[in-house]
Amino acid sequence: MQLLVTGGAGFIGSHFVRRILRADDIERVTVLDALTYAGNKGNLGQAFLSPKLEFVTGDICDAALVDDLMARHTAVVHFAAESHVDRSFTTAGTFVTTNVIGTQTVADAAMRHGIAKFVHVSTDEVYGPLLEGVATEDYPLRPTVPYAASKAASDLIALSYWQTYGAPVCVTRSSNNYGPNQHPEKIIPLFVTRLLRGEQVTLHDQGQHVRNWLHVEDNCAGIELVLRLGTPGEAYNIGGGTDLSSKELAAELLRICGVGWDRVTYIPDRLSNDLRYAMDWGKLAALGYRPACDFKAGLEETADWYVRNPDRWAPLSRSPLPAVPSPRTASSPVKERLYA
């Protein structure tokens, strides 16, 4: 298989690239990444030692570049996207351009060159909030924020290439991912890195918002399964992690870092903060998917990665974020074992 991976220097994409390079039937992997603030070649690490890896810096909206690359591959996994909810409130146009127009550009090239499989990577946020029950893949798409709306639109664009042209498109929708290398704007690395710096962390409202937390390696296992066995024209939910409210997640992170609730500040809820996401992943389970990572062990491993790699996240913490209250208090110690 000659595989093109868009967004392969991002958090999930880089984990996937390192995983797929180990497969014997993979002859070549080409990563196309624009290296925006969220992309980092360092995420790929030792993958660059593989003679099967090629890296191309470029934009998925560059139709000529995408077309040239697609002509040399037999399959594509499309990760490249703008993905931070808060940023989408102030730069919605960027999200629409990258997530919708970019997906159309990739899908168009995949259709033109007769790609054998096109996997479009999406999110559970396209379903919107569910106060009860779970969303199957046939559940209506009801996104509530610009980020989720742009991903829902990109899902429909991708699937339309199956309906219209017969392009072999599959869509994956995962729950919240966590793990090493994640950009510190996301909640788990944001909490850990702020606590390591002796700063306060914040919870919206009363911390009641529920998310399913899935280790990135489990998500990548699901994506690979869809790449190999997924039926064209179908969407597949990837879940099976641990459901936690944001307050419950904060409690786990405080425990790991050995600090108390005095380090937490409650702030007003953000715009359109969906109360609960929940998916049924039985469709992928029928293909053999089983999440393998224990949540507490995975969370501790993740926190330990940030302790051991400050050179990777400290410069990124200077990336401008949407303004939110972030009061400081006197430094508090974290567990000594985290520094070992």
Image (cartoon, rainbow, N blue to C red):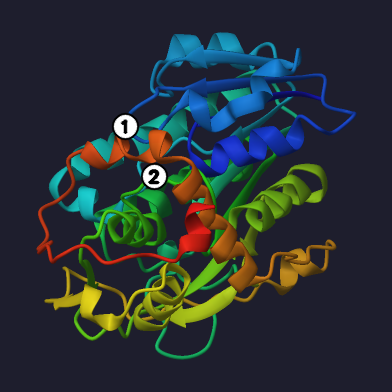
User: Which amino acid type is marked by label 1?
Assistant: Tyr
In this view, which residue lies farthest toward the bottom? 132
Q: Residue 241's mark?
A: none
Does residue 209 lie above or below 71 as drawn? below
The location of residue 33, given as percent across then percent down, is 47, 24
Q: Viewer-proximal residue, 239 or 208?
A: 208
Judging from the image, what secondary structure is the residue with disc 1 in? Answer: loop
Of the two numbered discs 1 and 2 on the same chain, state the one appearing first in sequence. 1
Q: Viewer-proximal residue, 257 or 134?
A: 257
Residue 228, visible in the rendered structure? yes
The location of residue 101, given as percent across then percent down, is 37, 32
The location of residue 188, given as percent across then percent down, is 40, 61
Residue, disc 2? 183
Left or right placement of residue 78 versus residue 326 in this view? right
Answer with the quarter of the image where residue 129 lies.
Answer: bottom left
**Picture mark count:** 2
User: Which amino acid type is marked by label 2?
Assistant: His
Answer with the quarter of the image where residue 319 lies.
Answer: top left
Residue, disc 1? 37
In this view, which residue lies farthest toward the right? 24
Does residue 277 lie above or below 24 as drawn? below
Judging from the image, what secondary structure is the residue with disc 2 in? Answer: loop
**Are discs 1 and 2 less than 8 Å apart at CB?**
yes
Residue 167, visible in the rendered structure? no
Q: Residue at x 37, y 36 (%)?
A: 38
**Quadrant of the frame with the N terminus:** top right
Does residue 127 lie above or below 122 as drawn? below
Q: Between marks 1 and 2, how big is the CA–CA gap?
A: 9 Å
Does residue 55 lie above or below 33 as drawn? above
Q: Residue at x 82, y 68 (%)?
A: 286
Q: Viewer-proximal residue, 224 or 75?
A: 224
Left or right placement of residue 166 versus residue 250 in this view? right
